[in-house]
Image (cartoon, helix red, strand yellow):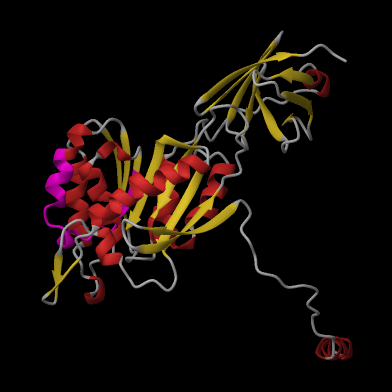
Amino acid sequence: MSIVVAALASTAVADPLTVVSEAPITQQGATRFVVHSDRLGRDYEVTVQLPEAKVFLPGQKLAAIYALDGGYGLAGSNSVFLGGRAMMAPAIVVSLRLAPGQPSSRNQDFTHHPFTVDGKTLGGGGAVFEAFLLQDLKPFIEAKYPADPASAVLFGHSLGGVFAANVFADNPNAFAGYIIGSVVVPRDPGLVDRIAKATARAHGQRVFLAVGGAEDSTVSEKRFMGQGFTALTAAFKASPGVTLQAKSYAGENHLSYYPNLMLDGFRFVLPPTVPVDLPYVPLSQSALARYVGAYALPDGRTLTVKPGFDNLLAAQVDDQPSVYWLPNGTDRFYAFTGDLDVTFDPSGLTLTGRGAKVRAERKPAQ
């Protein structure tokens, strides 16, 4: 007993923690802009989160997710996690929200048609916000980053879901994928019919539609979310041009299912370019040594392949960061952090990634 008392006494008089350093955290790979839209007359905060995947081939592109409401601060980091572990295709996440200090415009921006609440008419500016998104912001992002216009995704929840659904109704092919959560159908009574008609113009769009199973169970959240979910599910199924996954999260309310909406939605609309259970084919160090060397890329740069840790190869283009290649077949490797398939042959190698296929010839040994 005396030993225990002594230990407790020692703990009580121990020196407090010393703070060695303190600084704000900056998310790696993220850049934040504040942009002014002349079209809307407002400032918007745009956070661009890059994935772990490194783009180093000419013409190589990445998918891009445009997340409304700033992605609630979750979209970018979760995309990095999923993409870096081959659970979704690596994507650039563009999180968009009204800049701090600006007067609220969510009702105006996210609704294409005016609606009435307590006798007051609101909204109706969605078409202008859609033009800002498609004609101003999207080209701005695609000019600054390797964002693939053909692999863009729109992500909206609640009124943001109303907006995303209206964009689909206007032009299904504006985005390759849509993540739509908790659509408040009474805010736009004609939306369901417009969606059903628009599906005939869709060409392979992937749509993830979701709702919290308990959203309509309380007075504060009795907004007919379940009714809208059921009606929109039927509308999106009107054409084979849409690949739909519709999911109701049992027991979850309007906001509690949002993390699952994001994680499941990202994985559905941007499935990984390789299977999650990608085969791993261990190779001996002598077998790996066959691939080591310098390879000439068509643009004059040199791709250097070296032994990596464990059974991996490390590949580097000039002075860019190394990308690790996992052996997954005869003369074949896959780069998780580059989203590239690599195939070797006696005279060189071929790299294939989203939007790019490049041949590199082996250089003579020095």
Q: What stretch is highlighted in magenta?
A: 178-197
Q: Where is residue 181 in the image (x, y as percent from the top left)?
A: 31, 55
Residue 319 drawn at (x, y percent): 76, 35
Q: In which quarter of the image is residue 196?
A: top left
**From the viewer's perspective, is 168 left or right of 231?**
right
Residue 181 in the magenta stretch? The answer is yes
Residue placed most toward the observer, 120 or 223: 120
Q: Which of 328 and 128 is in front in this view?
A: 128
Residue 208 seen anywhere in this rendered image of the structure:
yes
In which quadrant is the N terminus drawn? bottom right
Figure label count: 0
Q: Is residue 190 magenta?
A: yes
Residue 232 vertical placement versus 257 (above, below): above
For the C terminus, which image quadrant? top right
In this rendering, position of residue 59 left or right of residue 314: left
Residue 158 is at least partly visible in this image: no
Vertical arrangement, residue 298 with respect to residue 141, above or below:
above
Furthest toward the top, the residue is 346
Q: In terms of image quadrants, where is residue 24?
A: bottom right
Q: Which residue is drawn at 34% across and 45% down?
A: 134
